[in-house]
Each structure stands twice: as structure tokens, then as C-alpha cells.
Image (cartoon, helix red, strand yellow):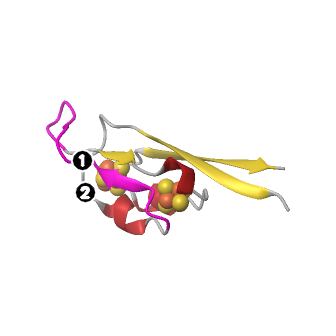
Amino acid sequence: MAKVQGAVIINEERCKGCDLCVVACPTGVLALQPKEVNDRGYHFAYTDKPEACIGCASCAVVCPDACIEVYRVVEK
Ligand code: SF4
Ligand code: SF4
């Protein structure tokens, strides 16, 4: 059966570190950078476990600043 794998691209400079996407992700893909900050001084979101992404787009839906793009790849 075809397996759907997702991939997300996060605009790190636009991210304000609000954590909503981290909480919304059902598979624990996302996390906030514990130490690094972006140019605006926020701990931005990054893909901690990219292989777990199922492409559900919950993260992109909840992000108030539209920082996340989701792609879906069907592996045959
Ligand atoms: S698309 Fe879904 S599984 Fe992938 S990072 Fe976003 S919320 Fe998590
Ligand atoms: S929801 Fe958007 S602004 Fe908030 S931490 Fe995630 S990517 Fe950053």
C-alpha cells in the first residue's frame, strides 16, 4: 500500500516561537529551538523528528503567522 510521507518547511525568521504548531502535531515532529534564536529574538520551531511527519497540515493550520508549508509525498 502506498505510504504518505509529509515534509514541512518552516520560515524560521517569521516564527515567533508561540509553540502552537508543536502542540498541534500528532506525531511529535516539531519542537522549539532550546537555545538558538532568530533575528527577532524568538526560539523558533524546527523539525526535530522529520521522519515522523504524515503531512496532516495541522501545524500549518494553527500557525498564526503562516510560517509553515506542508508537502506530501506518496511512496509507492
Ligand atoms: S504536517 Fe502534521 S505531522 Fe507533519 S509536522 Fe505538521 S502537524 Fe506534524
Ligand atoms: S505556530 Fe508558527 S509562529 Fe508559532 S511556533 Fe509554530 S511556526 Fe512559529
Image position, residue 37 (x, y; %): 19, 37
* Dominant secondary structure, magenta: loop
* Mark 1 close to ligand 2, CB under 8 Å: yes
In the picture, measured across the screen, residue 14 lies left or right of residue 66, that is left
Q: Residue furthest left?
A: 41
SS assignment at label 1 = loop
Q: Residue at x 39, y 37 (%)?
A: 11
Instruction: Give me the C-alpha separation between circle 2 and circle 1.
Output: 6 Å
Q: Determine whether 71 is above or below 40 in the image.
A: below
Q: Determine whether 69 is above or below 53 in the image.
A: above
Q: Amino acid at mark 1?
A: Lys
- Say which quarter of the image contains residue 64: bottom left
- Say which quarter of the image contains residue 20: bottom left
* Mark 2 close to ligand 2, CB under 8 Å: yes
Q: Residue at x 45, y 56 (%)?
A: 29
* Residue 64 shows in this picture: no
Whether residues under marks 2 and 1 lie with C-beta atoms below 8 angstroms apart, the answer is yes
Image quarter hosting the N terminus? bottom right
Q: Determine whether 4 is above or below 25 in the image.
A: above
Q: Amino acid at mark 2?
A: Cys
- Span highlighted in magenta in the image: 27-42
Q: Which residue is mark 2?
A: 18
